[in-house]
Image (spheres, rainbow, N blue to C red):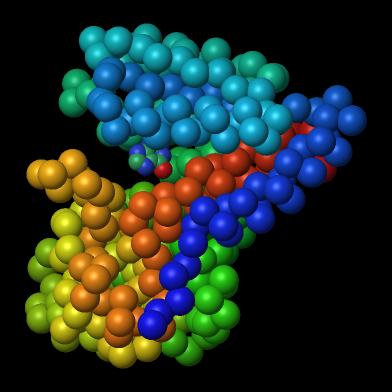
Amino acid sequence: MAQIISGKEVSKKLRAAMAEETAALKAEGIVPGLAVILVGDDPASQVYVRNKERACTELGFYSEKHVLPAGTTQAELLALIDRLNADPKIHGILCQLPLPAHLDEQAVIERIHPEKDVDAFHPANVGRIMIGDYHYLPCTPAGIMELIKETGCEIAGKTCVVIGRSNIVGKPMAMLLLHQSGTVTICHSKTRDLPEVARRADILVVAIGKPKFVTADMVKPGAVVIDVGINRLPDGKLCGDVDYEAVEPIASAITPVPGGVGPMTITMLMRNTLTAAKLANGR
Ligand code: GUN
């Protein structure tokens, strides 16, 4: 029986500590402020944005939601970001991705001031992560590091395999594991004999966006398995990138979907926003 790593429980602990810290800052007149921008009406994005707002309210943050129509121009979106960059109430700005196809995502990311870039997607922040000198970590990999910590598994010297090489998850995840002295391999669509590589992992992080991609034969007995996937099956149920029922009996620890990585991502966004508020006020 594997340990089921509950992102809900870990989030609860971390958010309780953050709520206390927020209350202490408020006593000094500092209220962390997050602006979330949503362009268009993608249903999954709407859910994420709602959850982010709810988390802000629970912690006592100030939050603003800017919902723009799908036909918004690049100039209009950049003008909003400029306004938020200049607004002292706002410490963090998040533009929900993906954007509609006519918008230039990278230009939008680069317009957000690096000190307000609580996603840590700006090239300046990405570069800082590479060096290991950063204020903000990207939310999903940061949340995963907290979940691995929760298992008690020491990363140093371990074989770590990350499946997926996105800028949001796979690449920064590999870097964070490397900072903790893991021996890291990144797998992707061109990897030869991916099951054999995955089977070497003591720590396996899966962020490939394919339902039940990782099967039991791809997992080393006793591995820590982190499932970043959120896929909707034809019957409407959510499932991860890992075949949970088959892999759970083999792993030493595994994250469920939902309730694993998902809640942690928002918790880490809240942590970055808190950090941004402190930095903006010289703390
Ligand atoms: N879309 C999916 N994940 C994320 C995220 O972490 N940040 C933003 N801005 N958009 C996303």
- Residue 41, horizontal then vertical, whole percent: 27, 19
Compared with residue 197, is residue 204 higher up or lower down, i.e. above or below? above
Q: Nearer the viewer, residue 245 or 69?
A: 245
Compared with residue 75, is residue 47 higher up or lower down, i.e. above or below? below
Q: Is residue 130 at all visible to an observer of this figure? A: no
Q: Nearer the viewer, residue 109 or 94?
A: 94
Look at 56% across and 72% down and name the residue there: 149
Q: Kindly indicate the quadrant of the structure image that contains residue 194.
A: bottom left
Look at 17% across and 74% down and name the residue there: 215
Q: Kindly indicate the quadrant of the structure image that contains residue 37.
A: top left
Q: Quadrant of the C terminus?
A: top right
Q: Quadrant of the N terminus?
A: bottom left
- Residue 11, horizontal then vertical, whole percent: 58, 53
Ligand 1 shows up in the quarter that is top left
Q: Is residue 281 at all visible to an observer of this figure? A: yes
* Tally of numbered discs: 0
Left or right of 200 in this view: 89: right
- Residue 122, horizontal then vertical, whole percent: 46, 41
Left or right of 12 in this view: 254: left
